[in-house]
Image: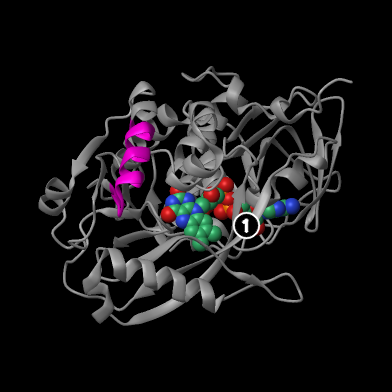
Amino acid sequence: MVSLRSGPALDSSRSGRRCDTLVIGGGLTGCAAAYYLAKAGIDVVLAERHSLNAEASGRNAGGFHVQIQFEPFVTLGEDWARSWAPTIPLLIDAVRLWQELPAELGADLEVKVSGGLLAAETEEELAAIERKAAIEREAGLEVELLSREELRRTAPYLSRSLAGGLFCPVEGKASPLVSTPAFARAARAEGAVLAPGSDVLAIEQTAVGFRVETDRGPIECERVVDCAGTAAGRVAELVGVPLPVESVPLQAHVTEPVAQLVQHLVYCAGEPLTVKQSVHGSILIGGGWSSELDDAGRADVNMASLRGNLRVATRVIPALAHVRLLRIWTGFCNGTPDHRPILGELDEVPGFFVASFPYLGFTAAPMMGKLVADLSRGRSVPYDLAPFSAARFDPAPV
Ligand SMILES: Cc1cc2nc3c(=O)[nH]c(=O)nc-3n(C[C@H](O)[C@H](O)[C@H](O)COP(=O)(O)OP(=O)(O)OC[C@H]3O[C@@H](n4cnc5c(N)ncnc54)[C@H](O)[C@@H]3O)c2cc1C
């Protein structure tokens, strides 16, 4: 068993602990970064203020998303979709990496890649899906447009009233409950020190790197890797570079286990929806429905979102009307204004790296951890990082 809650104090000497690289954030991105760094022989410490996997990485819906999401495609437009398209090759590779992880980490992560199905209810939606598919193909993503009959043959469990859809073969799912713990276990086995319960409070630049103050003592390091999820912007602000990382309160819904019903990751074009069935039979229903905030800023269940999510789910998959809901949970999802990730070293602060993938961050996290580990070791990565640079948020010169 990997301990997600306890770790060493960081003030093991009077002058503070030292390491090559400090990773901030014990979600999937941070634990993956710590694993790949330790595997490369780097002396790495990970500071997590709560338990490992306590935030979005342990609360998400477990979907692998690669296609351009339909809602921003419609609301932000085709120019936005083209500007987002550089993330597609990264996501395709991210799913390939997921498929290697069970062998790499020696753990069953419940990885299944059986494809995503975007269902259209109207001819207008189908036409928009066709325009979206053209941009996806240009970016190297294989997608297939499905007529009404083809959709019915591919997924007989979907409503007979659907107009058609799009099949994206590389999409799928894994378990958020076991993935971060598997990386944490593997990171510790490679020699990484993981310190849950260590809140990073301040970061000071020194002649040789950074002095990082945590509530469990100081730590000195040459490099910092910011994997703080919704707090990635606030952590970067500690070195004087605030980043517009948003925190979006969402909720997800899960049913009792039932016999095999949903074979794909199912979306609906007309309203937010994702549906997938776990290996244990329960059906996870989500798609970006918002939760509420209580007076203390904690996420709380939003009953209108619950009703809305179940309404669209049963419209697209009518058999779900006979399945009982078991549990609802909430979580905060990291976002960026342009939906593109932030990946790389801050121009203003050499040695400080950021890895934050918005909205689809579960899909991308192992790859983001691997890439930021390589970048922080001075290695190049096989992507143009300009669209992902934090510098894109710099205020325009006056
Ligand atoms: C309900 C929901 C459903 C989702 N569904 C999907 C999905 O189906 N597919 C998909 O791809 N994505 C999905 N996402 C998004 C995805 O979960 C996130 O983008 C992803 O988990 C981010 O991982 P992360 O490791 O970067 O951040 P997190 O998991 O948020 O981890 C960041 C960690 O940093 C820690 N931290 C922050 N500040 C500090 C500090 N100062 N000191 C120390 N530690 C700190 C936090 O405590 C946290 O544990 C969903 C999100 C939600 C909320």
Query: Could you tell me which residue is drawn at 41 percent across and 35 percent down?
Result: 91
Query: Could you tell me which residue is drawn at 68 percent across and 62 percent down?
Result: 197
Residue 179, compared with residue 296, is above or below; it is above
The verdict on residue 88 being magenta is no
Instruction: Tell me residue 22's x, y (percent).
Output: 68, 40
271 or 338: nearer the viewer:
271
Identify the element where label 1 is drawn: strand
Q: Which residues are magenta?
A: 117-133
In which quadrant will I find the N terminus? Answer: bottom left
Quarter of the figure with residue 108: bottom left
What scheme was used to colour the molecule?
Answer: one colour
Query: Disc 1 marks which residue?
Result: 248
In which quadrant will I find the C terminus? Answer: top right
Disc 1 under 8 Å from ligand 1? The reply is yes
State how many labels appear. 1
Residue 317, compared with residue 248, is above or below; it is below
Instruction: Tell me residue 207's x, y (percent).
Output: 87, 25
Residue 310 visible, this angle: yes
Quarter of the figure with residue 327: bottom left
Query: Could you tell me which residue is drawn at 14 percent across and 54 percent down?
Result: 152
188 or 398: nearer the viewer:
398
Instruction: Tell me residue 2's x, y (percent).
Output: 47, 60
Q: Amino acid at mark 1?
A: Val
Which residue is farthest right?
398
* 157 relative position to 284: left or right: left
